[in-house]
Image: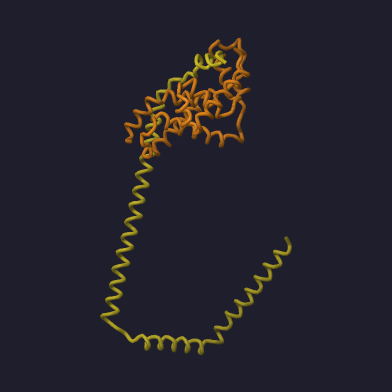
Chain colours: A yellow, B orange
Amino acid sequence: MKEIEDFLRENKPVVKDNPTFILEARRRMEAVEGIKAEVDRQRCYGRMALIIALVAGLVLGIAATAIAFLYPIDADSVGKGVLDSIRLFLTTWKQYLLLPVALLAIALSLVLMSGKRGKSTF
Amino acid sequence: MNQERFISQVREQQEPLRRFLLALCGGDSALADDIAQDALVRAYVASGSFLGLSKFSTWLFRIAYNCYIDHCRKARPDQTSLDSAVTLPASETSDASFRYQQLYQALERIPEKEKAAIALFYFEDKSIKEISAILNMPQGTVKYQLSMGRNHLKQYIQL
């Protein structure tokens, strides 16, 4: 066993001199620094966008609340008006509106049927 | 740790680190240097987590060993045997290069952990405690790996 130990100690692998090794390591570290800086910059942009969105939301919310308080409206009258106009539209155009609905239903049933047929072949 | 301090520490450790990886890579110095560069990048990225509780060299060797293990896992499917790669007739080589060839071939035949323990103990003169920290195994296991490694090498090296 002593012989093998002596052999190992006497025959340490010899490393070839590589003057570019440290230069290459330094170049890679510079690249890492570049990536780190870019990641930090992106993170900063993300944080700024978040703050801007927060501030904009607050400002718009306050403005909307202020307008609602300063110029109150009768919500019932607005609602009734909208519902009446929708009802009138449907009663006037119902025959033309039913046609695309029926076409859509037929197309959907055809698609579903073809899908089932496709599945059964495999 | 800033870049300059890191580089100065690396400058001191580059030769032992490259020698350790050279032994692990079976004498392939280009591959050993590639793994060493990867290890240095990983170490640099993680340098903030180095608290100085162990030696810088121990920490760096551990990262390098992990890089080597990662490389082995990736390279396993198309791994080529070193037996055929470095087999040269003894008469055509010098005595020293024949010994290195014999050593690398023998190291390639033994398990990775035994090879790493042998390289750290005999080539880098690391203590059992340091090897235990680098290879992340108990000191008793390191002694066992060294013993097994020596026994295996004895079978493959003609003295």
**Which quadrant, please, contains the N terminus of chain A?**
top right
Judge whether B138 appears above or below B89 on screen.
Answer: below
- Front-most of residues B113 and A26: B113
Q: Is residue A113 left or right of residue A30?
A: right
Q: Quadrant of residue B14?
A: top left
**Which quadrant, please, contains the C terminus of chain A?**
bottom right
Judge whether B39 appears above or below B109 on screen.
Answer: below
- Front-most of residues A111 and A77: A77
Image position, residue A96 (x, y; %) = 55, 84
Q: Is residue A12 left or right of residue B6?
A: right
Judge whether A46 appears above or below B131 on screen.
Answer: below
* Extreme-front residue of the structure: B140
* Extreme-right residue of the structure: A121
Judge whether A16 appears above or below A67 on screen.
Answer: above
Residue at (33%, 52%) from the top-left corner? A44
Residue at (36%, 28%) from the top-left corner? B9
- Front-most of residues B130 and B68: B130
Image position, residue A41 (x, y; %) = 34, 49
Q: Quadrant of residue B144?
A: top right
How many tags in the picture? 0
Image position, residue A64 (x, y; %) = 30, 74
- Front-most of residues A85 and B97: B97
Residue at (50%, 16%) from the top-left corner? A9
Image position, residue B70 (x, y; %) = 52, 36
Residue at (29%, 83%) from the top-left corner? A72
* Extreme-left residue of the structure: A70
